[in-house]
């Protein structure tokens, strides 16, 4: 008889860290214990599911995505390098196409200057 009258204060932990206080009569304790055990089993199943399925799946997806990013950047890096090489070759060609005529023109100027100097010197000698 005392068991039925006796009330028990039960404190259950919650996910957020807070607690829920339940005031139960003694004859409902067995039912509460059974429900509590069932809740613990469900939590253990959830933990097992996270540990054996979800964590490995997330890790596998992470590694796959990381590899894809590296692959894509590797591809684009190669494309950029090829483009860089083509631009440098074009620049070398443009440089040669610009420098060669200038150097030829300078060479002609130097030859003409040399001839002009010779002629100038001849004129000066003739005058004296």
Image (tube, helix red, strand yellow):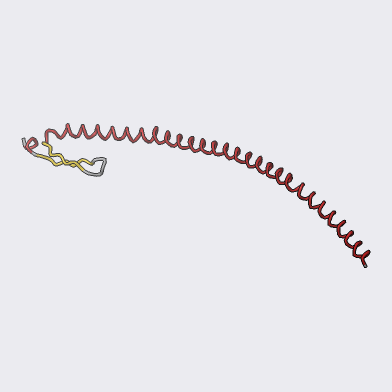
Residue 76 position (above or below residue 124): above
Camera-side residue: 65 or 59? Answer: 65
- Outermost residue to the front: 127
The residue at the point 24 percent across, 40 percent down is 14
Q: Quadrant of residue 58?
A: top left
- Outermost residue to the bottom: 128
The residue at the point 94 percent across, 64 percent down is 126
The residue at the point 11 percent across, 36 percent down is 26
Give left or right: position of 65 versus 25: right
Image position, residue 27 (x, y; %): 11, 33
Residue 1 position (above or below residue 116): above
Give left or right: position of 84 versus 60: right
Give left or right: position of 64 versus 117: left
Image position, residue 127 (x, y; %): 92, 65
The residue at the point 36 percent across, 32 percent down is 49
The quarter of the rendered structure image containing the C terminus is: bottom right
Camera-side residue: 2 or 16? Answer: 16
| Total numbered labels | 0
Image position, residue 71 (x, y; %): 55, 36
Camera-side residue: 37 or 109? Answer: 109
Give left or right: position of 6 versus 35: left
Q: Quadrant of residue 52?
A: top left
Image position, residue 68 (x, y; %): 51, 35
């Amino acid at each position: 008889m005392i068991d039925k009258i006796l009330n028990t204060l039960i404190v259950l932990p919650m996910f957020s860290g807070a607690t829920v206080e339940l005031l139960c009569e003694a004859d409902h304790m067995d039912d509460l214990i059974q429900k509590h055990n069932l809740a613990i089993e469900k939590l253990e199943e959830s933990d097992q599911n996270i540990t054996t399925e979800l964590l490995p799946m997330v890790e596998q997806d992470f590694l796959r995505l990381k590899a894809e990013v590296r692959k894509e950047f590797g591809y684009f890096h190669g494309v950029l390098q090829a483009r860089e090489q083509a631009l440098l070759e074009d620049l070398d060609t443009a440089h040669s196409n610009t420098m060669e005529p200038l150097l030829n023109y300078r060479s002609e100027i130097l030859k003409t200057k040399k001839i002009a100097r010779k002629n100038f010197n001849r004129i000066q000698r003739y005058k004296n």
